[in-house]
Image: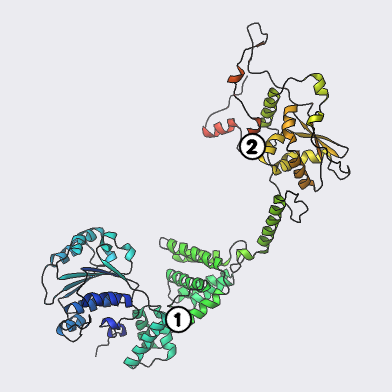
Amino acid sequence: MEYTALYRRYRPRRFDEIRSQEHVVAALRNAVREDRVHHAYLLSGPRGTGKTTAARILAKALNCTAPADGEPCCECESCLAIDAGRSFDLHELDAASNNKVDDIRDLLAKVALGTPGRTKVYLLDEVHMLTPGAENALLKTLEEPPGHVVFVLATTEPHKVVETIRSRSQHLELGLLPAGELALLVADVVADAGLDVDEEGQAQAVRFGRGSARDALSALDRVVAGGITAEDSSTAELLGALVASDAAAALGAIATGISRGREPRVLGEALLSALRDVFLVRMGVPPEQLSDDDRARAESFAESLPPAAITRALEVLGTALVDMRRAPDPRVDLEVALVRLATPPGGEFGSAPAESPALDDLVRRIEQLEQALAQGRPVAGSGATPPPVPPRPSRRGPAAKAREILAASEAPPESPADTASAEVAPEQEPVPVAPAPEGDLPDRDALALAWGDEVLARLSKKAKARFAMGRFTEVVDGVAVLALPNKPHLVRCTELVGEVEGALAEQFGVAVPIRLVVDEDAIRPPPRPGVGKPADGKPVEEVVDEDEEESIDPDELVDADAVVGSAVERITEAFPGVSVVEPD
């Protein structure tokens, strides 16, 4: 006697025999009972969840001679013919192999023909495999078929079905069966068929099924034929290697899995699925399809891997699986991905970034600096060492020289007496500060060395622009003397003296009072633009309207980036092959 596979022998024959798809069963049965059957249905879901079975039961219910409450009787000639696969009322077409335009045209040419039953049902399986031409050929008939025709489209990838077909169909989604429901199904089949399978064998069938009724019954067939098979432990070994940050163990697990006949892509997909289970368990939403053994394994690994590490592993493995499709040797992509996960730079795979002591110390130091700055006090003694400031270009660049020239041109002419008396007038002097012990202050060389590279970097943009032209000349009587180009510039800098003293205190760890003076060695301004030279060679002052001169704020000038190079170098790079001609 010919043996029939368990999934075929125990295929549901009525709507109420379909498990865990109540919403689909209710929609189809109510439509038959109330005579409101749609002209086209789209059934989607993972493999082995009952799409083809639901379509066949719908065809039986629509052509049954004695339906009861939307259910077929399964005893009349029409029902028996559909169960046996010899009915003219149900036409099944595998769209994966009959996906051309000619195949669909041949089907549509026979749509209007009558059949023995009341309704002709067309079942197109894997409809997402149709070519664009075949989809376009199907559209018009699918939207307005003859009154006695119903289309049922089945697919495992509904997102690949074009929107024009989905909009013409009533979409019903089938889901995977929970592990408990699958265990009940396996137990019922074992009892009804009188199979000699213990609980361990049934648990293995449920575990291999992973939510698919057909896969579970196929696994049960395998258990009956050959007993409990040794499960491939490659996935568990790979997870253990990732937790232990052992790249050698990960490579060994891949080699073992391939030697057992598993393809590299299958190993990667199994590991990705196991990591997803671990991630969902760690986040508190374990999948319903997990068996007890799989759930226990996921929980044990979830305790060892933080969510950040699991997320990174999912991303790296997902990218590797995509790259494996085009790789000449897919095993290499999988091995590289696992080595990256097992030996990541900067720490072990199982350590969370937030738990790093260095990161915790850095966060603490930043908080201390922010509090000190918010309170307006120096942070040198706060216990946090300021990070080193990268070297900055010298402030005595072209922009600084331009500032001095513009500032000097804006200042009124100074008499020799004013130049000799360089200090600020009594009414313009800043509030006097108490001198500090001279032994605790840095000397003039230390101030000059730290001024351009470090102290100025701590100032605000406004203060930095004003004090960039200053230079320390001496330290006398516990006060540092800071020279500025001219009186007007000195007056503008007076209001920001406190900020400069705070930056110096932060740099040297001691209060450094400063006194502003006019720099006697400041650069004198060149001849103004209005000065011309007549034919006799003597300079003559031209009449220039001051209102027409462009007003330039010296504080807005900045030095060019020394790293980029001069204008001549940049032009030479832009035009290869040119040569620079030196002037005579």
**Residue 272 position within the rendered picture, expressed as x and y whole percent measured from the top left:** 47, 69
Instruction: Say above or below: 222 vs 339.
Output: below
- Residue 277 drawn above or below residue 17: above
**Front-most of residues 533 and 194:** 533
User: Would residue 304 appear left or right of 103 to someone viewing this image?
Assistant: right
Residue 425: percent from left, percent from top:
80, 28
**316 lies above or below 244:** above
Residue 374 falls left or right of residue 270: right
Indicate the position of residue 30 as horizontal and vertical percent values.
25, 76
- The reply to whether residue 228 is visible in this rendering is no
Q: Is residue 344 left or right of residue 379?
A: left
Query: Looking at the image, can residue 528 be seen?
Result: yes
Looking at the rendering, which quadrant does residue 101 occupy?
bottom left
Camera-nearest label, 1 or 2? 1
Q: Residue at x 48, y 82 (%)?
A: 293
Q: Amino acid at mark 1?
A: Ser
Which residue position is annotated with label 1?
291
Badge 1 element: loop
In the rendered image, which quarter contains the C terminus?
top right
Please identify the quadrant where the N terminus is shown.
Answer: bottom left
Per the model, the C-alpha gap separating discs 1 and 2 is 66 Å
Given residues 147 and 339, the one toward you in this image is 147
The residue beneath circle 2 is 562
Q: Position of residue 418 (x, y in %)?
A: 80, 22
The amino acid on which the numbered mark 2 sits, given as a three-letter code, is Ala
